[in-house]
Amino acid sequence: MKQKLQRTPEGMFALMRRHPYLLAVVLCCVLLPFGFASRANITASSCVYLGVVLGAITVAAVFLFNFMKGLIEKLLLCGFAVFCIAAFMLTIGFVRNKTLAIAVISLIVAAAAIVFIKLSFKISDTVIIALLIALGIAIRFVYILYTGVVDRQHDVGDFTSTVGHAGYIKYWYENGLKLPDFDVRGYWQYYHPPLHHWLMALFIKLLTMLSVSFEKASEASQLLPMLYSSLTMIVSYKIFRMVKLKGTPLIAATAIVCFHPTFIIFAGSFNNDMLLMLFMMGAILWGLRWYREPVMKNIIPLALCIGLGMMTKLSGWMVAPAVAFLFLVILIRNIKKPLRYIGQYAVFGVICVPLGVWWQVRNLLKFKIPLTYVPDLGSNSVMYSGDMPLLQRLFSFGDGQLDYVYGSISFVGAPYNEYNPTLGLFKTAMFDECANSISDVHFPQIHITGPILFWISVILFLTCFVCFIISMIRKSENMTGIERIYFSLLFAVILVSYYLFCLAYPLACTFNIRYCMPLIPLCAMGLALTLQRTESSKKAAAAWFRRLMCILTAAFCCMSYLVYTQVGATM
């Protein structure tokens, strides 16, 4: 018999920990009416709706989980909470910049929650993690409110066109599951596997069936990438728990993922990168679970994650080599009784391979499109840098490249085209590069805070990178040697693939963190493992390192929240 969830305040956080994916889905559904707004054009009725929902949730939580002891105390708490919610909703309704108001109010609510829980109960790791994830969802929500279909998008176009990711989504919206009877190379971005675009089209179709206009429904479809980004926070947290992180190191690693600008930006993107990231992180998690318990119930979700990831974007294959290594290890360990595992591998292949490559195989057979086809803009593109010496492209950090810390493509307002893949990683991780890109050219209000965020991130993630390498080399109680090789292979394959891609397609738009996003939580994990290891050290240097990295992580998270609130402050 499973122990029943206690109806206590602690039980509320236990519920959140037990069903985090469901709660994230419910929260995004609650926020759906705001998705109909175009660029923060939030209506008064939406504010009333949200106020009623929050009030109902608050009253239910107070009584269901026994906040306060007596009935009078419960009623007083409910009355005070409803009054505060009403005040917040009125503030959002009357102020001109509603996205700024939502960002500030989210911080106030989180701070008030910490104070209340601290005074009434105790602050646990679970409470802090829950609040970090809630604030992470809040800043993603704020971002999509001030980000429209044509704002800061990659190869999206718009929904009035027949090309780009938006045109591809509209194709499936209009044609259902009817596969293209034409060579997809003739339509920009149609070569991508269709899973993400199917889901977006289905979401829009469901809304239009409920009498929502196509324009509003397509704007609201941003909530799907926001959901993917929110779920990525939870999956990353579960990976961190799997490697036995706890306390401050666990909080630091989770905070980095919650507030990293990349996951904020792609929460508002109409392309397929965020769904791919979710599936890749899911594959990493289930690969580790399967290795620790190699049974059928664990290999099926692993096969689905890799297969569906490749059905979202072919680069989902990058998880496969590390997973294949685990398969080989388990087979060698059980070489005398291999049939059980061979059967599992067969099931894995039957699920993963058709899902992962059916689209590419169909296009190869029907239109002679290469399996690994990627459109090449060629040397005539204004973004081309292949005519520069290779050593300069890889190792040059001078010539004013660091004077401009934002994603650098000349036709979106930057002073030059990026040609160094490493600098491209650091810059796009903070600000991306695209039309209406985030820079002080388009948003003068981040003239000071933008560079501060960039340089904090450079120091933090160079440290994280070194910590990851050290954590994978040194023995640890957190994971076995095989598991360290597993994570090392993941990291190496993703990073090397990124650089090979940059060399094969030397264009400024190629040098982007979106091609290797899983490195972010892996680096955060490396930092956390090092912090946890140094907790047992009595050396002063170790204590100072922990303090410095905690301060740096906190500064990074605060600056990221500030910058992405400021970007919306002009709306």
Image (tube, rainbow, N blue to C red):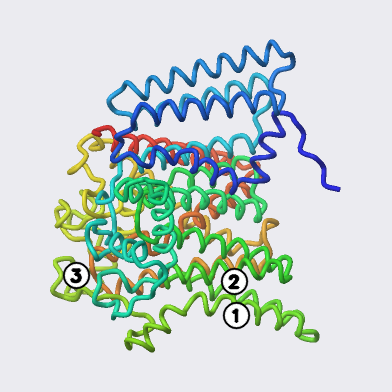
Is residue 64 shown above or below 184?
Answer: above
Mark 3 surroundings within 10 Å by alpha-carbon count, few (fewer than 14), some (14 through 19), many (20 or more): many
* Residue 546 sits in quarter: top right
Q: Which badge, 1 or 2, is on the more N-terminal residue?
A: 2
Q: Residue at x 21, y 53 (%)?
A: 435
Residue at 58%, 38% (x, y): give it. Answer: 130
Q: Is residue 313 visible?
A: yes
Residue at image position (76%, 85%) is 339
Residue 241 screen position, x and y as percent: 64, 51
Closer to the observer: label 1 or label 3? 1
| Tally of numbered discs | 3
Q: Nearer the viewer, residue 278 or 354?
A: 354
Distance of mark 1 from mark 2, alpha carbons?
Answer: 7 Å
The secondary structure type at the circle numbered 2 is helix
Q: Callout 1, which amino acid?
A: Gly
Q: Are marks 1 and 2 in contact (CB under 8 Å)?
A: yes
- Indicate which disc residue 223 carries: none
Tag of residue 349: 1
Q: Distance of mark 2 from mark 3, alpha carbons?
A: 38 Å
Q: Type of residue at label 3?
A: Ser
- Say which residue label 2 marks: 303
Judge the density around disc 2: few (<14), some (14-19), many (≥20) Cα neighbours within 10 Å.
many
> What residue is shown with label 3?
385
Q: Nearer the viewer, residue 278 or 369?
A: 369
What is the residue that sits farthest to the right in this orientation?
A: 1
Viewport quadrant of the C terminus: top left
Is residue 262 visible in the rendered image? The answer is no
Which comes before the other along the chain, label 2 or label 3?
2
